[in-house]
Image: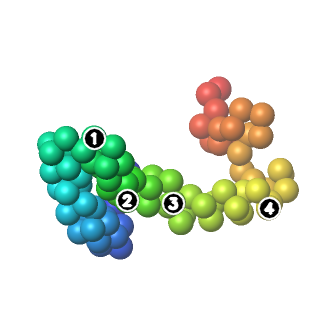
Amino acid sequence: MSFGLFDMIGLAASLAFALPLANYAIVRLLAGETALGGGLLVVAVAMVVLPQYFLDPARIFRGLIRGLLPRQLRGDDAESGTDRDTVEK
């Protein structure tokens, strides 16, 4: 996955909020509060992972356009899910 300038800025912003939360979660885990620490650690990881892998605007836009286009204009093989150019001969 290649990051552009805006992707790097978004990642830095996510990390600016997720790292203190993860630090607090680890402190709570070491203090014996397993449920709170584990829950906060899951939230901190989700703050970084979700925007980078699941909420990618380009991927959402491509899926929306691909779903709206007729099968002939999609540019992929509907049965196998691969592009026409990548099919082995």
Mark toward the start of the polypeptide (1 vs 3) = 1
Mark 1 highlights which residue? 34
Task: Say if mark 2 contacts mark 3, CB within 8 Å.
Answer: no
Q: Secondary structure at mark 1?
A: helix
Q: Residues within 10 Å of mark 4 (few under 14, many from 20)?
A: few
Looking at the picture, how far across and down is residue 81, in whole percent? 69, 38
Mark 2 highlights which residue? 47
Mark 3 highlights which residue? 55
Mark 4 highlights which residue? 68
Q: Secondary structure at mark 2?
A: helix
Q: Secondary structure at mark 3?
A: loop
**Nearer to me, 23 or 31:** 31
Q: Amino acid at mark 2?
A: Met
Q: Amino acid at mark 3?
A: Leu
Quarter occupied by residue 76: top right
Residue drawn at x 33%, y 43% as measured from the top left: 35
Closest to the camera, between mark 4 and mark 2, is 2
**Nearer to me, 11 or 21:** 21
Q: Amino acid at mark 4?
A: Leu
**Nearer to me, 15 or 67:** 15
Task: Say if mark 4 contacts mark 2, CB within 8 Å.
Answer: no
Looking at the picture, how far across and down is residue 80, in whole percent? 71, 32
